[in-house]
Amino acid sequence: MAVSTVYTVQSLNSTCSISTPSKPFSQKHILFFTTTKRALTRSCRQISCSAEDKTVVIGLAADSGCGKSTFMRRLTSVFGGAAEPPRGGNPDSNTLISDTTTVICLDDYHSLDRTGRKEKGVTALDPKANDFDLMYEQVKALKDGAAVDKPIYNHVSGLLDPPELIKPPKILVIEGLHPMYDERVRHLLDFSIYLDISNEVKFAWKIQRDMAERGHSLESIKASIEARKPDFDAYIDPQKQYADAVIEVLPTQLIPDDNEGKVLRVRLIMKEGVKFFNPVYLFDEGSTIEWIPCGRKLTCSYPGIKFSYGPDTYYGHEVSVLEMDGQFDRLDELIYVESHLSNLSTKFYGEVTQQMLKHSDFPGSNNGTGLFQTIVGLKIRDLFEQIVVSRTAAALEAAKA
Amino acid sequence: MAVSTVYTVQSLNSTCSISTPSKPFSQKHILFFTTTKRALTRSCRQISCSAEDKTVVIGLAADSGCGKSTFMRRLTSVFGGAAEPPRGGNPDSNTLISDTTTVICLDDYHSLDRTGRKEKGVTALDPKANDFDLMYEQVKALKDGAAVDKPIYNHVSGLLDPPELIKPPKILVIEGLHPMYDERVRHLLDFSIYLDISNEVKFAWKIQRDMAERGHSLESIKASIEARKPDFDAYIDPQKQYADAVIEVLPTQLIPDDNEGKVLRVRLIMKEGVKFFNPVYLFDEGSTIEWIPCGRKLTCSYPGIKFSYGPDTYYGHEVSVLEMDGQFDRLDELIYVESHLSNLSTKFYGEVTQQMLKHSDFPGSNNGTGLFQTIVGLKIRDLFEQIVVSRTAAALEAAKA
């Protein structure tokens, strides 16, 4: 399964620092990407990386064309600052870097390029077309505070381009088809999200994009979806059982027999008992609620808006599910909805609404996809901050002892 | 329609007092029940009844055997003190008197006794069997602060007994078949309630009482209900359009095809825009909500509990509807439900639960009938207090001028 990949030996700037919190300074160190996991880990420990500097790793799984990039833009926005590709690097880089977060695309761990996949008759969804050993080694290295030279899969040419340098960020997001597929990689994740777009919606979206915008025929779109389905069902879909949060995108139930896929029913499925993650709730934690906010205070046009909330089980796990069906007429009225949600991990009253208004041009801003992506972004910021606090406290304890 | 009724001329103690708030004292005055409305009113004004002493009048309409007496016991309990029949009076009196409230039964205004009704072929539901002129005169007199000599309809003998003295209380509740039937009486009401028991539930209750407890046959029960129905539909049911609050009692929707009538779905329909009455709401005023409180915090056995809340229209009026389907397993857990209801007009946290626990032996204490009767009791107390405050303020204004 492991196929030759491009990696180099380089001298890098790492964010690892000597653990004297008052005088942190950067420390050059050399990373050998051919070293074993143990050696990589040791390289960081030897120079006393402070625990609180350890990278927090988030996994985001979804099929391609399912809004991962919008999600990532919402996430990085929560932390402030814009996300950009590495400066002066490959213009076709899939990486997005902001002050706090680095988002890497797991397509970069394709072990087979487009031609290679064609020759072997495998899709990009097939684990055989991906190098999980390298994915694991590099994510582990970044988590431990060491920089890596990550390959680039060029989506334009379909080729594997020379690698780019990725320094360990505060938060590393690995997004793509398989962040939870490999058990070793999965165990590196501090939090994991699965974007679950139902077949009906996926189909409607593809029609919109490939037929209306790219002139493909309905038959060819159907055929392409059908061709991907077996591998998707075998390798991608099963990952959702491991996710701490799942965003499910379904057709609306407010319009009988709707198949336009424009009005969406979106469900945020939040696993209970995840450390540093307290599920959002509506009105009353742990009970079951349906709420139509339209009425005397919020005016909605057809088909209105309906929220649901309640406990459930998902792949044997206890979860809380928050659902929004329908769409907002006026985004500034979202504050009314926001004020009735609890455990949002906002830093000030109205932060969700502010974030949504800031990016009102992003797809899904008037429905549950945008709302729940924003909320998950806030929960990740909160999780990150809790992890840092907890590590600092542990480090202080250790220093005292 | 007006038939001969029993009334006497008596010298009475009235609660009317000279309007010097620091030194109120009782004032004897004579009431002539044959006087006109104008004369009765003047009799009170002449001795300067203070406005805040004016009796607040509440109307409660319902068919017989529909829980009016339980409701009245819950209502008087809210004001503190027990309600008892007039001391030393007719043991078959229908009146209940407590410190604050006097509840009179409108059956006392039957103009035809049982034999008379049989002879004329009319039911007690028929306006022809009731003296609305006297009802109006006496309720008006009591409202204006004058005592009356009210007839007594003896439910045991079916005869009209000699009258009993009713002094003007702080709150007068007129309960029975026709409190909102006569327009003049209706306009005397400061607040009106209609207990609306659905035919299915009424039937189940009659079966329980008349078949199980009194040995009647199913056929005779059906026949008796059918016989009452035309008059009920013609004269009683239409009153609900005038009610400020309606308590609707329906079969549960939690058990498919239930016809036992044991688990109830109860709806509290509250008219909007009624002075001194702010409808209760669940979570978010004016929106539409369904809430199943059973879950992580409240354990419910089958079939559980479901609350609903939302705006609606009722006979062309804008209303808010609060609904409870199902029943409580443990009444002390009601505090959990109470804490999520707003505008309850309680005087302290948990007062609804305390009232319900105090009378846990009353029928309907584990379901919406008891809960909503208690809530309506609290709303009436609040309405009464607001009226008193408003009248006192008006009196002070008038004194200043």
Image (cartoon, coloured by chain):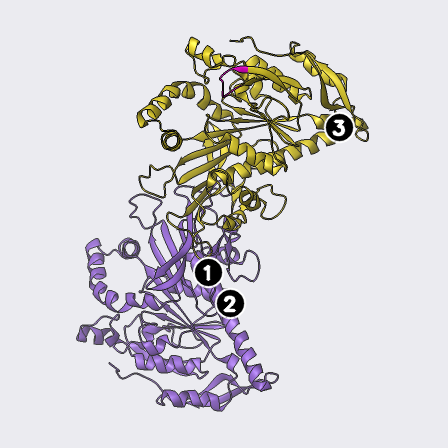
Chain colours: A yellow, B purple
User: Which residue carries the number 3 mark?
Assistant: A395
Residue range (magenta) = A154-160
Residue type for callout 2: Asp
Name the element at disc 1: helix
> Is residue A158 inside the magenta stretch?
yes
**Residue B221 appears left or right of A347:** left
User: Which residue carries the number 2 mark?
Assistant: B382
**Structural distance between the alpha carbons of marks 2 and 3:** 58 Å
Residue type for callout 1: Thr
Vertical position of residue B170 compared to residue B291: above or below: below
Foreground of the two, B259 or A386: A386
Mark 2 vs mark 3: give the one in front.
Answer: 3
The mark found on residue B374 in the picture is 1
Q: Position of residue A347 (x, y in %)?
A: 63, 44
Mark 2 vs mark 1: give the one in front.
Answer: 2
Name the element at disc 3: helix
Q: Residue at x 79, y 26 (%)?
A: A25
Residue type for callout 3: Ala
Neighbor class of circle 3 (other Cα within 10 Å; few <14, some 14-19, many 20+) is some
> Is residue B61 inside the magenta stretch?
no
Q: Position of residue A261 (x, y in %)?
A: 37, 37
